[in-house]
Every structure is written in C-alpha cells, then in structure tokens.
Image (cartoon, grey):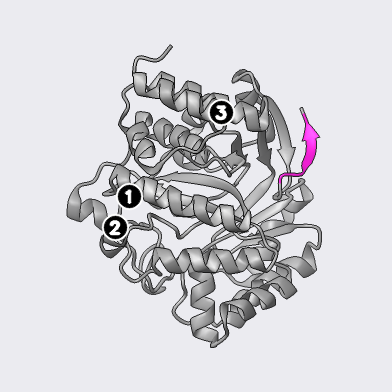
Amino acid sequence: MFSDSFLEKIFDKVKRGERVTFDEGVRLFETEDLIGLGYIADFVNRKKNGNIVYFNINRHINPTNLCINKCQFCAFYRNSLDEPGAYEMSVEQIIKTLKPEVENGCKEVHIVGGLHPEWKFEDYLAIIRGIKENFPELHIKAFTCVEFDHFSRISGLSIEEVIDKLKEAGLGSVPGGGAEVFSQRVRRILCRNKISGERWLEIAEKIHQKGLKSNATMLYGHIETYEERIDHLDRLRKLQDKTGGFNAFIPLSYHPENTELEKRLNIKGSTGIDDLKVIAVSRIFLDNFKHIKAYWVMLGKKLAQTALWFGANDLDGTVVEETVTYMAGYKTERKATIPEIVNLIKTAKRKPVERDTLYNTIREY
C-alpha cells in the first residue's frame, strides 16, 4: 500500500489509537510518499469527522495595519498613517461594513489587526461593544494572544482582567494568529518584537481557563526546519491535553511578497506539495484536535479542496475581505460564496455542513 515502509508503521499505530512521537513526526515530513501520507491523514480524519466538511458564513475585519511589532514576514503593517496603504477604521466604519453582511446571513466576525501605537485598550473594547450593541446575535471572534498581551501592557491590567473585560463587552471566542513558529531561533529572525512562543501558550491557557475557545495556527514555509514544525505542533498538543480549549488548528502558508524577509533572504514560500504535507502531518500528529482547517485564502481554493483528501475537514468560510494576506501580494479571490464553497466540498465527494464558530451544525447540504 505504501511506497515508504515507514508509513506502514505509522498506519498501524494510528489504527491502534497510539500517539505519534516527536521523531516520527519529523520523519513524516521527510517522506516522499505523499499519497500514502494523505491516505493515513484521510483515515484519521474520517474516524473523527466521517464525511463532513465544515464552513461558516463569516466576515473578516482588520481594524488597522498600524503596528509597533514590525515583523519581518509581514507585508501588512505600517508605521504611521503617512505611509502608503496605512489605515485605521473607526467603530462607525466597522459597523457600516458589517451591516450588509449580517443582513445577508453572516454569523461570525473575525477581528485581528496591528498593535496600534496610539490606541488604548478602551478603543479595542469599544469595537467589541459597538458590534455587540448593533448585532447582538453575531458571534465575535477577536484578537490574538499577541493582542491580548498588548492590551495588558497598555492598560496595566492582568491577562485575566483583560479577558474578563473583553468577555463583558461581548467577545465570544479567540482566533489563533500570532503563534507563527514557537522556536526562539525563528522568532528572533521573523518577529523579534513579538511575544515569545511560551507567552503565546501561557495566554492561550488563560483564555481557555476563562471558558473561551480559541484556535491555533502555525506559519510555515519560511526558515523553519521540520524539527521546529514538530516542536510547535507538540507544544500545541500538550496544551490541548491540558485544557481541551482549541477548536481547530489552521496551518498558514507564508506569502513572502512585499515583506522584509523576502528582501533579506530571498525566500520563495511553500510549494503545493509542502502545503499538503503540513495539512496531513498536522492531522496525524495532533490527535487531540478534532478540526484541521484548509484556509483557502492562503492555499487557493483548488488546493484547499485537494486538502480535504489529506486530512482537512474545514474550509473556513466566506471571509469577504482578508487584508493581511492580500497585502503580501496574493492574487486569489478575497471572497467565497456559499454555492462556491458547497460545490468545492461536494465535488470532493464530501458532505457540506454550515457551522457556527463553535462547530454546532446550522445547516446540512
């Protein structure tokens, strides 16, 4: 069945319900048997989720790209409003942007953005309050662990107090960005000013302890090694063992165009083969995560559809306007319609299910 005999050992392990080790995870990335790797990942996924592939009707809002972190991999950030492409949105602009989407059935707003050099914590709370007051039924998934840390520093509040105030304002769950790769070596080069991987995990744990679900991500395809990828997945798996608070894992394919990292190191980003490997290895290694997302915004819709045969069981959602990847020169669409997503899932011979943010079924197709 497998051209790489090592995969036979892994397949036997997962059939017995045994956990893949760190070294085995690294070896999975090294295999040249892509189809065999996908077969195992698909087997694991079907045991967890059957034939179902989820999506949701959501809208991304990136309130500002002014940011003090200056990450080397990021084409999104600007230092000041004087720079070309810099922007900031008022609460009124955000409400105006969301109104037609909510009227057309949007169930979730996903909010991440830069660490604005002048905004106070109250400004971010005002965004959440404004959305909740105008759209009380809309689920608000907002702010990464990096942003939570920023809120704590600019307000003088503890992380626990920050979480409490955001929950009181209407926060429903937390996205998984800012994790990048937890390796200290990688972060020194990619995002020296960003919180450490340890701090990201610490804040995620506190979020879970406060009763909020979150997602987890990994940015790959730049300077990281296979060992650093597995180290990242292993730390997520350990925290999930402890809290059970992660909804989904979302691999994020690095897009180098217009970034400082591309200029310095001439990095080209991941290939389609690597994208599928990351999805598959994540599904096999993260045995305590039920959902693996093929984020079509970064993969492209056709490769995201293919990933449904390599362990993914979620295509994210309609998105409408994602700015972070777009500013890194990505050329695919920024929006997906419901019929388009349903067609992608059905033609992959899977069953489309519209979900809410917490994976409750809204509609089966």
Quick one: label 1, few (<14), some, or many (20+) residues within 10 Å?
A: some
The answer to which of 334 and 233 lies nearer the viewer is 233
Which residue position holds label 2?
186
The amino acid on which the numbered mark 1 sits, given as a three-letter code, is Glu
Quadrant for the C terminus in the image? top right
Q: Does residue 301 appear left or right of residue 261 in this picture?
A: right
Residue at 45% across, 60% down: 178
Earlier residue among tags 2 and 1 = 2
Which residue position holds label 1?
228
Give the Cα distance between marks 3 and 2: 35 Å
- Which one is in front in this view, the residue at disc 2 or the one at disc 1? 1
Q: Does residue 282 appear left or right of residue 57 in this picture?
A: left
Q: Is residue 37 visible?
A: yes
Q: How many marks?
A: 3
Is mark 2 in CB contact (under 8 Å) with mark 1?
yes
Span shown in magenta: 359-364
Give the Cα distance between marks 2 and 1: 9 Å
Label 2 secondary element: helix
Q: Main secondary structure of the magenta part?
A: strand
The answer to which of 343 and 80 lies nearer the viewer is 343
The amino acid on which the numbered mark 2 sits, given as a three-letter code, is Val
Label 1 secondary element: helix
Q: x, y (%) of residue 90?
A: 60, 72
Residue at 44% across, 49% down: 234
Task: Work out whether 252 lies above or below 283.
Answer: below
Q: x, y (%) of residue 214?
A: 61, 57
Which disc number belongs to residue 16? 3
